[in-house]
Image (cartoon, helix red, strand yellow):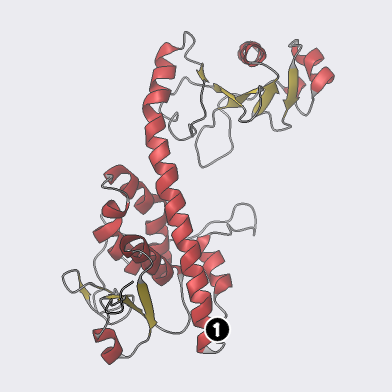
Amino acid sequence: MGIFSKKTKIGVHSGSFHPDDVFAVATLKLLLGNDIRIVRTRDPNELTLCDYVVDVGSVYNVAQRRFDHHQKGGAGERENGIPFAAFGLVWKEYGKQICGGDDRVSNKIDKELVQFIDAMDNGVGTVLPVKADVYPFDVCSIIALMDPCGDEESLVNEYFGRAVHMAQTILENCIYSFKLLFVGEKYIADAYAKSGDKRFIILDRNVEWRELVSHYKDLLFVIEGIPGTNQWKVRAVRDSVHNFTNRKDLPLSWAGKQNAELAEASGVPDALFCHNKRFIVTAASKAGALALVKKALEA
């Protein structure tokens, strides 16, 4: 950096931090690179000197690069009723650019991550328990743990930086994973078209298929290789990516068995392992996995 270079200043409120402001700053870091300075303040005079201001200042104006939602009337809401918080406002403006111009990836991140954080920040919606009084330990819970809650400002700023780094990593991984997801879409469609029995498909390379197969209503099992080995596995297709209900369970007689015991129960000599919950079974070969899926379909 030259001696006359000026770092881009991102203004954000001081004090306790939340997923909304953390992810808004992380988004701008992905947009602008690391040659930035984060200014944590509520002083209007300091904020006027910032190139971007998020989650403070009571102004939403894209032309002025101001992204707050605390002003009277808020900063608008989506068609589904979820109001925009600072993260959503920044993502709406720059998400597609950060995702390399890919609308599908940007929109999926908005649906999977941004809208949840915006909803929690605006006090909209209900987080339901997984079971009884056991609740999801979500990204909002993680960010809350990273806030030192009222300790000296220098420590809060340090932990804010750590939280932003983590949020940036999450966003980078979302972009990478969702791009791969959509790349795999055509591959899975081709595998389904080639399958003589539409109740299962064989994937000769590893792709993230759980969400992509949901609209193939007759599909029950997926056969795929196990990375780094010569082994293969059969996985049951779930009724939904949001639950653990298999469209068809593997046979009860296989549950929890492995090696010789599973080989005897299944009639497949190179069968290796079947999970107690009957959603996955493995074999030492592709032929073994194919034999297992055919027996599972007959059961």
Camera-nearest residue between 266 and 230:
230
Q: Is residue 173 above or below residue 265?
A: below
Q: Which residue is drawn at 74% across and 18% down?
A: 271
User: Where the C terminus falls, by quadrant?
Assistant: top right
Q: Which residue is drawn at 37% across and 65% down?
A: 29
Label 1 Cα crowd, 10 Å radius (few <14 / some 14-19 / many 20+) = some
- Image position of 26 (left or right of 252): left
Residue 80 appears in the rendering: no
Q: Which amino acid does label 1 sit on?
A: Leu
Q: In this view, does 242 lie above or below 246?
A: below
- Tell which residue pokes out farthest to the right in this image: 261
- Image position of 106 (left or right of 18): left
User: Where the N terminus falls, by quadrant?
Assistant: bottom left
Could you say whether the residue bearing mark 1 is in a helix, strand or loop? helix
Q: Is residue 34 above or below residue 17?
A: above
Q: Is residue 74 above or below residue 256?
A: below
Residue under label 1: 155
Camera-nearest residue between 131 and 273:
273
Residue 221 appears in the rendering: yes
Q: Residue at x 67, y 16 (%)?
A: 285
Camera-nearest residue between 63 and 77:
63
Image x and y of residue 276, in percent = 74, 32
Image x and y of residue 289, in percent = 64, 16
- Image position of 117 (left or right of 263): left
Camera-nearest residue between 140 and 167:
167
- Tell which residue pokes out farthest to the front in this image: 2
Q: Quadrant of residue 74?
A: bottom left
Q: Which residue is drawn at 40% across and 68% down?
A: 20
Image x and y of residue 254, in percent = 75, 22
